[in-house]
Structure formats: structure tokens, C-alpha cells
Amino acid sequence: MSLLTTPLDELHRELGAKMVPFAGYEMPVQYPSGIIKEHLHTREAAGLFDVSHMGQVVIEGAGSAAMLESLVPADAQGLGSDRQTYALFTNDRGGVLDDLIITRWGEDRFFLVVNAACKAQDIAHLRAHLAGQSLEVLEEQALLALQGPKARDVMGSLCPQAAGLVFMQGMAATIDGVEVYITCSGYTGEDGFEISVPNAAAASLARRILGFEQVLPVGLGARDSLRLEAGLCLYGHELNQDIDPVQAGLLWSISKVRRADGERPGGFPGAAVIFERMENKPALRRVGLAVEGKRPVREGQTVIAGDGRPVGEICSACFGASVGGPIAMAYVERELGEPGTALAVEVRGKQLPVTVTRMPFSPQRYYRG
């Protein structure tokens, strides 16, 4: 099966990107400057990411908020206009089908951004639960992410009114005569923006942004290391259909009004299971691990307790360029998840010392006004 490409494919190749298959697309994993430089530049200035492989969907019609609340534990009904919320599609076992961002575009109109690898199943899941609403997949829209402490300065030149947005707020705007939708969001832990732009204008906007000296193009490699340092979950790693929001450390994603003692309790798949986990605590919990020395650990490797007992598994790992050493996230037995706990990871028959550490590894710097 041939891979899909984004509207920026020609630009990636022109910039010397190393292209790899990802979620059915050919995507840039890095550019000639390399993953570490791209990572550090995003932390220090600004990076531009192509995230056009993500799914962009509009749900519209009476009862849209209630329909969404039948699928996610977020407070869609209480969401203000042009405000966003992180949400989880849950299953009947309390596991996670995908994580997504929901933005309210009007009284009965919502804009959803879903993960590329889950896009087809998410759209089918939504369609199966429509109750008179319409669903439109925005096939003709690309998505750019401008991230880093200098992103706001760049946005000030591109679209001054959008430079005042705060974290998880959006607005319709015009850049160079092109209608776009800009949100103050992203998945690096840094301040920044995501811009939904028509495919036909995406490459010219990307070139315009890359014309600012503060901005470098950044690929999937640094996108992954940045989100891991920020302690953020990646679907298929920290989240899957067998991991519930409680063990994932995402209790905050279950809105207070949707909890067992809230105004609109439950009503989403797996609610009873999740409420039970909230009450009695799951056996495993997601933790950060600082790795001793420079040798990296890998996803899937076993975490070992002091008595030699297997107590968990690595779900994501990388070299944390801002931290200056290898880091990882893992699921381990709950009682061993306190910061400072000494554990080990089995690497090729040897035990590599690791220490449970607080997350994020690198401070989150979202602009909240």
C-alpha cells in the first residue's frame, strides 16, 4: 500500500529531511541539523512541525455537546466558545481508544483533532454515535505547529491578534489573505500555536514562518523527545485500549462535572470501571524514570525491583536533550511509583539502574496570561 503525503512533502525534501513511514504517511523524522539540535532549538527559540497527518473533523448540529459527552469524560457542554479541552475516547473496559483535542466553534459546532494512526477508527466511532448531527472531515486542511518561547514573537508578526491567545484558546484569523484557524496549543510542553490552513496555502505559509531567524523545521524525532520530556502521553505507548485514565495519571482529563459525584456523572463508555479505579486505585501507575549513565533504555524492556522481581515495563524512552541524559516513562506497580524509588531496567541481560522521578522532566511553559 502506497504511503500518503502531506501538502508540505515537497518542502520537506527540499529542506533535506529524512523521510520515514509513520501512520500511513511519509513524514520527516529529522532534518540535516539533527534531532538534538532541533529539540534544543525548540526549547530555546521556535520549531515548526508538520502535523498535517492528524485528523481534523467538524461535528455540527443540535445536541453535539451531549453526543460528544456520550463518548468522552470531558465537559463539552461547559466549554466556552473558541476554548479547547483535552479528551479521551474511552471503551467499555475503561481503556482509551484515542486521545484528542476538542474546540468549541459555536453553540452546536465542535472542531476535533485526532491522532493520525487512529484517524479512520475515530471517524467511524463518531459516525456510529451521531444522533442527527453532521460530521465533516477537513480533508483540504493542513496543520502546522509552531512551538517554543519565540513562537509568540513570530505569531506577533504573522497575525498580531493571535499573539494574545492563551493556552487552549483559539480564533479564526487571516494570514497573508488566507483564512486560518489558530489555537494556542501543541505537544512539546512549550508555549506555541497550531494553525489549520488550507492545503493550497500550507507550503507558502510554512516558508513564510521558516523565513524568521528564530524558526527551524523540526521532525518527528524531536517531536517525540520534546513530548516525553514534557511528560505527555503518546497513543500506542502510554495509552491504549487496556490502559485507563487513572493508571495513566490523567485523572485531570475526567471533568469534575462528569465524575461520580458531579452534576452529570458518567454517561461515557467504561465510566463505572473508571470510577472504581478512582476509588480503589489501579495496580499499576505511569512514572518517569531517570536513567543512570548514558546508556539508553528502550520501549518494552522490563523494569526490575531491588529484589530482582519484574514490576513493570518501559512504554517510551529517549535521550532527553534538555535533561542531558536518557529518560523514560514506564508502568510500574503502584507502591513502587514514588519519586526517589530505586529500580532497574533489564538491558541485554544486565540491570541498568534507574530512579523514579517527578514529571515533567523539563518544565512545561504554556502561556496562561
Image: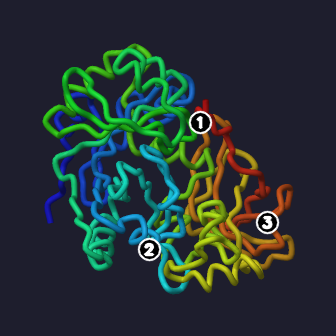
Report x, y in % for residue 8: 21, 37
The dot on residue 154 is: none
Is the residue 335 above or below the residue 183 in the image? below
Report x, y in % for residue 42: 50, 30
Which residue corresponds to mark 1?
Answer: 366
- Rendering quarter of residue 3: bottom left
Name the quarter where the C terminus is drawn: top right
User: Crowding at label 3, few (<14), some or many (≥20) Cα neighbours within 10 Å?
Assistant: many
Q: Amino acid at mark 1?
A: Tyr
Q: Nearer the viewer, residue 302 or 75?
A: 75
- Rendering quarter of residue 11: top left
Q: CA distance from mark 2 to mark 1?
A: 27 Å
**In the rendered view, does 109 fall on the left or right side of 338?**
left
**In the rendered view, does 82 fall on the left or right side of 231?**
left
Q: Nearer the viewer, residue 324 or 40?
A: 40
For mark 2, give the secondary structure. loop
Q: Residue at x 35, y 50 (%)?
A: 106
Q: CA distance from mark 3 to mark 1?
A: 26 Å
Which residue corresponds to mark 2?
Answer: 71
Which residue corresponds to mark 3?
Answer: 337
Q: Amino acid at mark 3?
A: Gly
Choose mark 3 or mark 2, whichever is in front. Answer: 2
Q: Are marks 2 and 1 in contact (CB under 8 Å)?
A: no
User: Crowding at label 1, few (<14), some or many (≥20) Cα neighbours within 10 Å?
Assistant: some
Q: CA distance from mark 3 to mark 2?
A: 30 Å
